[in-house]
Image (cartoon, rainbow, N blue to C red):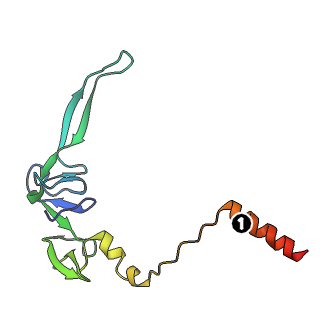
Amino acid sequence: MNVKLNDTVLVITGKDAGKQGKVVATSPKSNKVVVEGVNLQKKAKKARRANETSQIIEKEGAIDASNVMVVCDACSKPVRVKYSVEGGKKVRVCPKCGAVLDKAYAGKKGAKAAEVKEAPKKRTRKRAAKKAEETAEGEAE
């Protein structure tokens, strides 16, 4: 499935064709996605307690992943996703402008090389620190 969470997508078929929205949930096994503001379904909610009121709730329903196209952030056009290997990782790429569609990967492009790990601070027990201070004071006198 070439659609991931938080992608901006364009619905290409169905009653909501032409609408754009953000992917709220994905289900790779059933090849379905839930898009914000698309395929709204009404559901009656019954009052369960005396102080509650019954109401009709609108929520987004799942649509097939083949009915949406990913919108490129750089060129703002719906595209078919192209895959390429960059730095040992398989990433999604826009075939029209060449921009990386994976937001997590795009932010980490040069950060990994610049990142230097610091050694963790050595922990000292309070008792050992007090003894060291006492011996230092004793030697100073």
Along the horizontal axis of the image, is 33 left or right of 117?
Answer: left
Position of the N terminus, as image quadrant, is: bottom left
Q: Which of 108 and 115 is in front in this view?
A: 115
Q: Which amino acid does label 1 sit on?
A: Ala
The residue wearing badge 1 is 129
Nearer to the camera, 72 or 129: 129
Q: Which residue is drawn at 29% across and 22% down?
A: 54
Instruction: Kindly identify the residue that appears in the image at 23 percent across and 81 percent down.
Output: 88
The image quarter in which residue 126 lies: bottom right
Q: Quadrant of the C terminus?
A: bottom right
Residue 97 seen anywhere in this rendered image of the structure:
no
Front-most of 62 and 57? Answer: 62
Residue 112: x %, y % from top left: 38, 80
Visible in this render: residue 23?
Answer: yes
Describe residue 88's horizontal placement relative to residue 53 as left or right. left
Q: In this view, does 20 lie above or below 97?
A: above
